[in-house]
Image: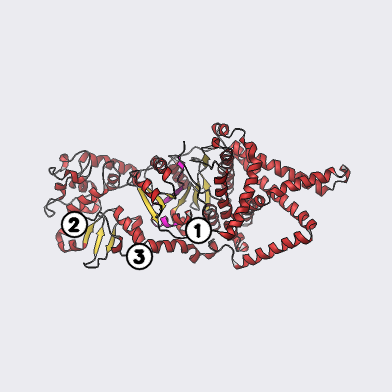
Amino acid sequence: MRLGEYSQAPSLRGGDAGHDGRVPETAAQRDLDAAPAPAGEAAALQSLGFSKPLVEAIAAKARNHGTSLEQELLHHPGIEENAYYGAMARFLRLPFLERIDSAIVVDSEHADTQLRRPTMIRLQHQRQAPQMAVIPRAARLGDLAATLAHRPSLREGLVVTTPTALRAAVWEAGALRRIRHTVGELFDQRQDLSARIVLMGGQGFVAGLLTATLVACALTAPGLFFSSLHPALSYLYLLGLILRIMALLHHRQRHETQVRDVTGPLPCYTILVALYREAAIARQLVDGLKRIDWPSPLLDIKLVCEADDRETIDALRAQTLPANFEIVEVPPAAPRTKPKALSYALNGVSGDFLVIYDAEDRPHPGQLREAYSRFCELPAEVVCLQAPLVISNAKASWISALFALEYSALFRALLPWLASHRMPIPLGGTSNHFRVAALREVGGWDPFNVTEDADLGLRLFRLGYRANVLQRPTQEDAPTTRAVWMGQRTRWFKGWVQTWLVLMRQPGRLVAQMGLRNVLIFQLLIGGMLLSSLLHPLIFVFLVEGAFAMLAAPAEDIPARVLMLFVVDAVNIFGSYLIFVTLGIKAMTDDEQRQVGMRWTGVPLYWLLTSIASWKAVMELRAKPFFWQKTPHQPSS
């Protein structure tokens, strides 16, 4: 029900107010000069007509959460924002604006502060004097009433509005300024960190020279070329294999620590979800976010949508979103990428901490509490925590089964090992928890990098910050068809190439920032992965070539170099497959292992598809570097 529905009720003072806390219109129409000025929030709310039992109940919540009574009241079931602030306006005898025309909002960069802490905004009319739209606070309602009583002339320039109306007007009024700033800020401020230019001048020259040299060598001296390429690629593979063996040994020795939740007052936490063409899973998304264990007044949930994606926006609005949900509409502008949408929404983030989720994610309800607890325990240089991503549809197809193995190995074995040794962590695209101040300091997400997670994780590290990991997971679904998987993996590879090129613009500076050991790890994780994926089929060629060479010659005449390379190639092929499967299986639960079943035998084909995706990514990087291949999602069964 709305407050206005009680407009014929008698004045509700003290015990006359209903337990539902709704304010009668007559209570707000009392003579302002005769009304006693409220001494505090509780008195103010009772003066507005809220019952004493309700005020006492929300006061207990406020003490437990470290919030104000007003914050708790506005998130109490049955309380509507328009009715609450309309009652305040009537109490103060001021006009009430349920909606603000963005055309009369005076826009400036400073106005964006009102997206985070809405209090007031200046309205510039064409044919009347300017006004100030204000959001009164219950704690200061008595002071404001007294001021207006002694200076009635102030009423002429004041109107009361709601936080939702004010934010909506500010978002719309500054949309063009904000989108230009979002797209250009990182490039304008730190061009060396932006992927907007695929190859810098020097990089382009070196890449062209190196390519021409390799092609010339392959054509003029193929024997020398391939005899040099063979050991280089083989030993690179071997180093990557050793890295994963170390992660496996660490996982076996690792003991999960008990997750401890921080009790007492909590900070404001923001959840950002970037959506595009996700109407089908709007209900599942909202239901999942409602299950998050965090006080509603301190949970700032922003559903970030492209403004022209009306189907998704309408589907979200149809869910009757709670008060702590907000739909942020991103103006259409190139590049049409997830990181651009996230960086745009960052302007309105009010939380001290922030987490990214994807539309299909089902995070553990206690994940935010674990993250905040970890942030409190860890040093301030740790500004990001990665939650493990667990694939819930591994049994759907052989593609999703191997995807589940891959994610298990990465998020529950490799990343914890990297974190334990203070090494750089390439983040996953979701369930990253950040300290907001540090995120803003490093420039947020790069709108032009289509694998923004890996880019941001490495940028944080090179600028002096670190990342760590969590235990409470996020459930999500993997692609189940080859076509969808190929599109997604091509985009990932393209973004990894972008990330590698950005970091390698100034190699000497990178070593100074990250340290030699960490640069080598980066080269193995990103550069080595890219190169080995591109040239993966050659390993089979080298293995077969070595086998024929040894079969054609007597055992005593086989050169040690040929024998050594054959052994390395055999270890690379069979060892890499084995460690891929073992690392993934060991990190899985029994139920997850049953879902995978025997489909792990498809690893060789999976890796060949990965090689195809990497070549497609290289070609796409030249033709359409910022194209974002959308991965379709459906509700989980």
Label 3 belongs to which residue? 108
Say if residue 164 shows up in the picture: yes
Residue at the spot 52% in from the left edge and 52% down from the top edge = 629
Q: Give the range drawn in magenta.
A: 342-365
Kindly identify the amino acid type of the residue bearing the numbered disc 2: Leu
Label 2 belongs to which residue? 94
Q: What is the secondary structure assignment of the residue under circle 1?
A: loop
Q: Which circle marks residue 313 in the picture?
A: none
Residue at the spot 71% in from the left edge and 52% down from the top edge = 233
Q: Is residue 19 magenta?
A: no
First in sequence: mark 3 vs mark 2: 2
Position in image of residue 621 (x %, y %): 58, 58
Kindly identify the amino acid type of the residue bearing the numbered disc 3: Ser
Label 1 belongs to which residue? 446
Q: In which quarter of the image is the N terminus?
A: top left
Position in image of residue 444 (x %, y %): 47, 57
As displayed, is residue 502 above or below residue 402? below
Q: How far apart are marks 3 and 2 (CA)?
A: 26 Å
Q: Assess disc 1: are there few (<14), some (14-19) or many (≥20) residues with their C-alpha within 10 Å of its C-alpha.
A: many
First in sequence: mark 1 vs mark 3: 3
Observer-nearest residue: 388 or 35? 388
Q: Quadrant of residue 618?
A: bottom right
Observer-nearest residue: 93 or 152? 93
As displayed, is residue 462 above or below residue 273? below
First in sequence: mark 2 vs mark 1: 2
Position in image of residue 439 (x %, y %): 46, 55
Residue at the spot 29% in from the left edge and 61% down from the top edge = 121
Q: In which quarter of the image is residue 458?
A: bottom right
Q: How far apart are marks 2 and 1 (CA)?
A: 45 Å
- 125 vs 400, left or right, is left
Q: Does the magenta stretch include residue 348?
A: yes
